[in-house]
Image: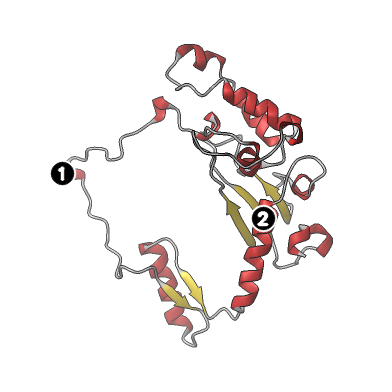
Amino acid sequence: MQELAAAPRPATAGQRAPSMREDTIPSRLRVLIHIQSQTTCTSTAPAMSAAYDRAAELRALDATFSGVRGLVASGVTHVPRIFRLPDHHQQPLHEPIHPSCQETPAAPSSKYVPVIDIGAGDRTSVVAAVGRAASEWGFFQVTGHGVPLESMATAVDAVRGFHEAGGGEGSDKARLYSREPARAVKYHCNFDLYQSQVANWRDTLYLRMAPDPPHAGELPETCR
């Protein structure tokens, strides 16, 4: 499985946004930008809260087939409200903990991200290392997998090329845009866009390569 999420940054006030003429922006994306231009005030304003239609903004974003990359390319200068946590859900970074309830988390056995050679001959040691890394860190780097560095670099470049390409109707992104769990090849902006409390600033290209790789025609052109 190959999955890579791209998270381009919106232009901030005073910065020059990526060039794109108004007449080249997909109409549905222009609608979303128009909606956002009216909701840049903080969510504490009662009038704005009453006028805010989150579901409509989610559908508008989904209909562009362009994700956050399309928002950045369009010249958006504010992070849209659907990507921001509502004020009433903001929590302190550190909740006070009563001394009697405080637990000291187990410290990792190393200050470096674990590197595990899965090609090592001692399978028992590899399994133990994976379990330890998963419990202490939650992630680890894998070596000894036999995939050449050149192949990995080529795969990353191909996926990056897909994300940086234009979107909208008729594009490769529109062809692959889906939230269908069974699809082996798909692209979307947030798989849980309509379920999560706040959207993540990311687009994802999902390729399920095992046990049965998809046909070349199903892949993005940059990945064939």
- With respect to residue 40, does 188 lie above or below? below
Q: Is residue 210 left or right of residue 88?
A: right
Tally of numbered discs: 2
Q: Residue at x 27, y 40 (%)?
A: 94
Between discs 1 and 2, the one toward the N terminus: 1
Q: What's the mark number on residue 206?
A: 2
Q: Secondary structure at mark 2?
A: strand
Considering depth in this image, is 19 or 78 the residue closer to the camera?
A: 19
Q: On the picture, is 22 further left or further right than 45?
A: right
The quarter of the image holding the C terminus is bottom right
Name the spot of residue 43 as percent of width and height, x first.
46, 22
Choose between 184 and 101: the one closer to the eye: 184
Percent position of residue 193, x then y: 60, 38
Q: Gap in Å between the C-alphas at discs 1 and 2?
A: 45 Å
Please report the residue visible at 72 percent of the width from the left and 40 percent of the height from the top: 65
Residue name at image x 53 percent, y 13 percent: 50
Between marks 1 and 2 in the image, the one whose residue lies nearer the viewer: 2
**Residue position for label 1:** 99
Circles 1 and 2, Cβ within 8 Å, touching? The answer is no
Q: Amino acid at mark 2?
A: Tyr
Q: Quadrant of residue 136?
A: bottom left
Direction from residue 126 to residue 103 in the image, left or right: left
Give the camera-side residue of 69 and 20: 20
Looking at the rendered image, the quarter that the N terminus falls into is bottom right
Q: Which amino acid type is marked by label 1?
A: Pro
Q: How is the image coloured?
A: secondary structure
- On the question of residue 85 being in view, the answer is yes
Please tell me how crowded label 1 is: few (under 14), some (14-19), or many (20+) other residues with Cα within 10 Å: few
Residue extending farthest bottom: 121
The residue carrying pointer 2 sits among few (fewer than 14), some (14 to 19) or many (20 or more) residues within 10 Å by Cα, namely some
Residue 112 placement, left or right of 192: left
Estimate the x, y position of residue 83 in percent, counting from the top left: 52, 35
